Amino acid sequence: MTGLGLRVGAIALLFTVTSACTATDDPTAGLSTVLEQEDAIASVPRVVALTSLTADLTEQLQPQSLVGIPGSSLLMEDPRFADLETVSSGRMAPNLETIVSLSPDLVVGAEGFHEQTAERLEELGIRTLLTNVNSWRSLRQLTEDLATVLDVDATPILQRYDACLAQATETDSTALVLVSRQPILSPNQESWAGDVLAAFNIRNLAAALQEDDS
């Protein structure tokens, strides 16, 4: 996170300089270390996330990279995102002026929602990535893609995915997921929720109905 990350970085740099001054009479001691840390901070890619999922993934992969988030209640209630700039609110389109002011290297949004925003940002020379997470496999792919952009190792998060799947039930369980009451909506086998149920060996009753209709 840029606000918090830069402050933590500044404290770390100050601690390094202070320790160097108290440990030696050489006024240049520790200077190279300080400069290396400053370069590392400056080289971290700056990312604006337009969805809660991509914000969370970016923060877990490299907290210092995340500089902007959507106005989601899921994020606003999480202390990890407390000091970050909000670039959207509710169903309103993301604020281009706010995004540009953050000087991002990458803006990550969602297909079907952020095409116009991405097109305008690309015209301004800002790289964008639109995601479509509709399966467990696509979640893994997105994690790996973001890790590549951030130049970090995605292995710890991928291992957490695997550990989660390892808890899948071996019994013949069934489930019906309702995502809305008016009208009544239930995710089918081609949806994110349907794919997650399949990954955990849970029979999705809505998917069974879809098969019967076909």
Image (cartoon, rainbow, N blue to C red):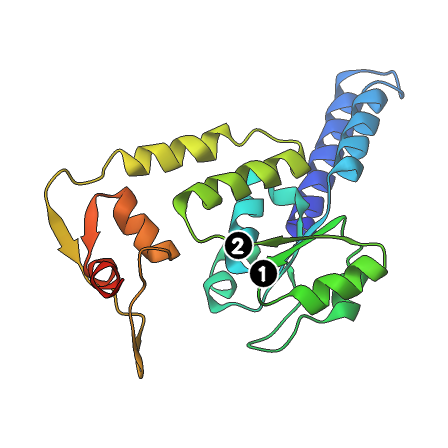
Q: CA distance from mark 1 to mark 2?
A: 6 Å
* Total numbered circles: 2
- Left or right: 153 as drawn, with respect to 14: left
Q: Position of residue 99 (x, y in %)?
A: 74, 63
Picture quadrant of residue 170: top left
Direction from residue 195 to residue 21 in the image, left or right? right
Mark 1 touches mark 2? (CB < 8 Å): yes
Label 1 sits on a secondary structure element that is loop
Mark 2 Cα-neighbour bin, 10 Å: few <14, some 14–19, many ≥20: few
Residue at image point 71% right, 69% down: 116
- Residue located at (46% from left, 35% from top): 157
Mark 1 vs mark 2: which is more N-terminal? 1
Name the amino acid, label 1. Glu
Choose top left, top right, bottom left or bottom right for residue 49. bottom right
To which residue does mark 1 refer? 111
The residue at 48%/52% (across/down) is: 133
Compare residues 93 and 137 and report the one nearer the observer.
137
